[in-house]
Amino acid sequence: MGTFKFAQSTSDYPYDYQLDFSEPSDAGNAGMKSTPQFKDHPEQLVPFAYNNFQVASLAGAYYTTQDNLDKDKSIFLNLKKDYTLGTLFSGELKAGGKYKSKNRTNHSTQNFAPYYLGGWSPNKRLSDGSVVAKDFTGTYFEDFYLGYLANPLDNTLSFLEFLDDTPQTRKLL
C-alpha cells in the first residue's frame, strides 16, 4: 500500500509601507517634555510626547515586500506478502520506505528613504533612465510642491500634508 501527500502554502505581501515622522526638539512645544528616569516599561513615556502635528515632518520612509513558500511532499510505500512453506513455516515478508521533503523560502526586500538627511527630491528617474520633474497636480501634496517651487529651501514634508482637510474617523485593527 502506498500514499502520496503534497501540501503547499504561499503568501505575498507586496504593499507594505511605513512613514516615520519626527518633531524638532527645539520648537518649544514639540518633541518630548521633561521625563523622569524609567528603568523598565518604556510605554510610560507616551504621555510625555507633545505630538505636535503642526511641526512634525517626514523623517524616513520604508517600502517592504515579502513572499513566502512552504512546500511539503511525502511518499510512503509499504509492501507485504504472506507465505507458507508446508505445514511448518508461515509468515509474512514486509518491505517499505518513506521519502519526505520540506522546502521553505522567504524572500523579502526593503527600500529606505532617509528624508531626514536632506529632504526629498523634486525629480524622478523613469524606467528609460530619463529624469523628469515630479507632478503633484491634484494630490494632497500640490500645496507643498507649490510652496517648494516658491522657496526650494522649504523641502521637508509636514505630517499635515498626509491628512485630509476634514479627516474621517478610521477604525484601526
Image (cartoon, rainbow, N blue to C red):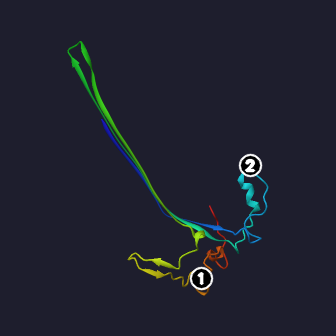
Residue 39 - label: 2
From the viewer's perspective, is residue 63 above or below residue 168? Answer: above
From the viewer's perspective, is residue 90 above or below residue 43? Answer: above
- Classify mark 1: residues with Cα within 10 Å, few (<14), some (14-19) or many (20+): few
Secondary structure beneath label 1: loop
- Of 81 and 46, nearer the camera is 46
Which residue type carries mark 2? Lys
Instruction: State which quadrant residue 162 falls in.
Output: bottom right
Residue 136 - label: none
Instruction: State which quadrant residue 114 falls in.
Output: bottom right
How far across and how far down the image is residue 1, in percent? 30, 35
How far across and how far down the image is residue 125, in percent? 44, 76
Instruction: State which quadrant residue 101 falls in.
Output: top left
Secondary structure beneath label 2: loop
Q: Residue at x 58, y 86 (%)?
A: 149
Which residue type carries mark 1? Pro
Left or right, 53 with respect to 126, comes to right
| Contact (Cβ within 8 Å) of mark 1 with mark 2 | no
- Of 93 and 164, nearer the camera is 164
From the viewer's perspective, is residue 32 above or below residue 122? Answer: above
Q: CA distance from mark 1 to mark 2?
A: 44 Å
Q: Residue at x 74, y 72 (%)?
A: 27
Q: Residue at x 61, y 87 (%)?
A: 150
From the viewer's perspective, is residue 41 above or below residue 57? Answer: above
Q: Residue at x 66, y 79 (%)?
A: 165
Q: Which residue in the protein does label 1 denote?
A: 152
